[in-house]
Image: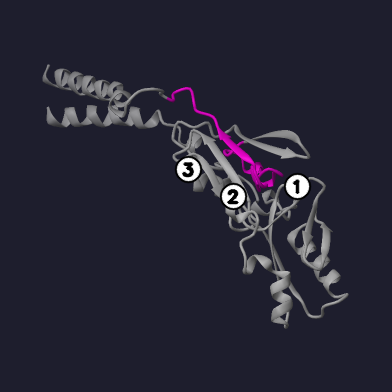
């Protein structure tokens, strides 16, 4: 009798576990069928846009000149006291203004290109200057069916969709994985793209690597419960399991 009960219980548990399609919650479940070298996407350098904040550090052998070129190292940057990232803000026309150097056009430039432009300008009057530029306001937002939605600051110039989801605590089990929306603004125009995390072709998407101020939205699945406590959410499963166990015991006894 006990053996019969164990067999019935094992059969019931097998039915429950087989109902869960792990492919729906696995990232890039077709990756084993593809050649990874063909699905990777070359990282495009981050391009500076109006509204970005640049931290530009210029170092020379003359300390006095270095202090003039880096006023923020002595006094707070005008942006630092307003709850914003310290640095030089790119104006609506794509320019930043630096001491001695003057106005520099940086729109659609990379930080490496900005370093070269400033160095070339300084070489007219100052020799052997070292220039380092980075974007300090690189942020992305992750909303929807994730563990910890929010806005996240990126310290480097590189962030992929997987990095964003990792910072947000990963997708919830109930999240839709084949339709992740990325919202991007380019020259004042909103662009939308859908990424399928079950498909390795996403690795080659131009939206795989995120830009500054991109928004990632994760849609909740049809089974996502709303407005209920954890106990209420788990109650149907508990009742179902209890009912199954009761039925198995009755069948076994009879």
* Image location (x, y in percent) of residue 54: 69, 57
Q: Are marks 1 and 3 in contact (CB under 8 Å)?
A: no
Could you tell me which quadrant the N terminus lies in?
A: top left
- In the rendered image, which residue does mark 3 sit on? 170
Q: CA distance from mark 3 to mark 2?
A: 32 Å
Let me know if residue 145 appears in the view. yes
Q: Residue at x 62, y 65 (%)?
A: 75
Residue 169 is left or right of residue 193, and the answer is left
Q: Are marks 2 and 1 in contact (CB under 8 Å)?
A: no
Q: What crowding class fits label 3: few (fewer than 14 Cα within 10 Å), some (14-19), or many (20 or more)?
A: some
Question: In what element is the residue under mark 1?
Answer: loop
Tell me which secondary structure the magenta stretch mostly adopts.
loop
Q: Residue at x 41, y 31 (%)?
A: 20
The answer to if 203 sits in the magenta stretch is yes
Q: Name the residue furthest bottom.
A: 61
Give me the disc on residue 50.
Answer: 1
Residue 46 against residue 60 in the figure, above or below: above
Say which of marks 1 and 3 sits in front.
Answer: 1
* Image location (x, y in percent) of residue 218: 54, 33
Question: Which region shows up in magenta?
Answer: 196-224
Q: What crowding class fits label 1: few (fewer than 14 Cα within 10 Å), some (14-19), or many (20 or more)?
A: some
Residue 228 against residue 171 in the figure, above or below: above
Give me the disc on residue 82.
Answer: 2
Q: CA distance from mark 1 to mark 3?
A: 31 Å
Question: In what element is the residue under mark 3?
Answer: loop
* Image location (x, y in percent) of residue 161: 59, 45
The answer to if 66 sits in the magenta stretch is no
Sequence-wise, the earlier of marks 2 and 1 is: 1
Residue 54 against residue 185 in the figure, above or below: below
Sequence-wise, the earlier of marks 1 and 3 is: 1
Sequence-wise, the earlier of marks 3 and 2 is: 2
């Amino acid at each position: 009798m006990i053996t019969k009960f164990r067999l019935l219980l094992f059969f019931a548990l097998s039915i429950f576990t087989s109902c869960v399609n792990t492919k729906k919650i696995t990232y890039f479940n077709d990756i084993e069928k593809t050649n990874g070298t063909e699905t990777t996407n070359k990282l495009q350098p981050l391009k500076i846009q109006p509204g970005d904040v640049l931290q530009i550090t210029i170092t020379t052998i003359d300390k006095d000149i270095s202090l003039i070129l880096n006023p923020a190292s002595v006094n707070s940057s005008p942006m630092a006291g307003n709850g914003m990232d310290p640095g030089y803000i790119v104006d609506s026309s794509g320019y930043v203004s630096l001491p001695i150097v003057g106005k520099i056009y940086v729109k659609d430039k990379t930080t490496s290109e900005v370093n070269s432009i400033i160095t070339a300008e300084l070489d007219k009057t100052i020799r052997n200057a070292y220039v380092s530029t980075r974007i300090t306001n690189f942020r992305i937002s992750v909303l929807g069916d994730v563990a910890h939605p929010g806005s996240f600051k990126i310290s480097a110039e590189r962030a992929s969709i997987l990095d964003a989801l990792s910072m947000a605590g990963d997708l919830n089990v109930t999240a839709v994985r084949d339709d992740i929306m990325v919202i991007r603004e380019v020259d004042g125009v909103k662009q939308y793209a859908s990424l399928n995390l079950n498909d390795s072709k996403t690795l080659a998407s131009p939206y795989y690597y995120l830009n500054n101020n991109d928004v990632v939205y994760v849609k909740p699945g049809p089974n996502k419960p709303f407005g209920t406590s954890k106990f209420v959410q788990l109650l149907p499963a508990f009742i179902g399991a209890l009912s199954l166990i009761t039925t198995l015991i009755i069948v076994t006894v009879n």
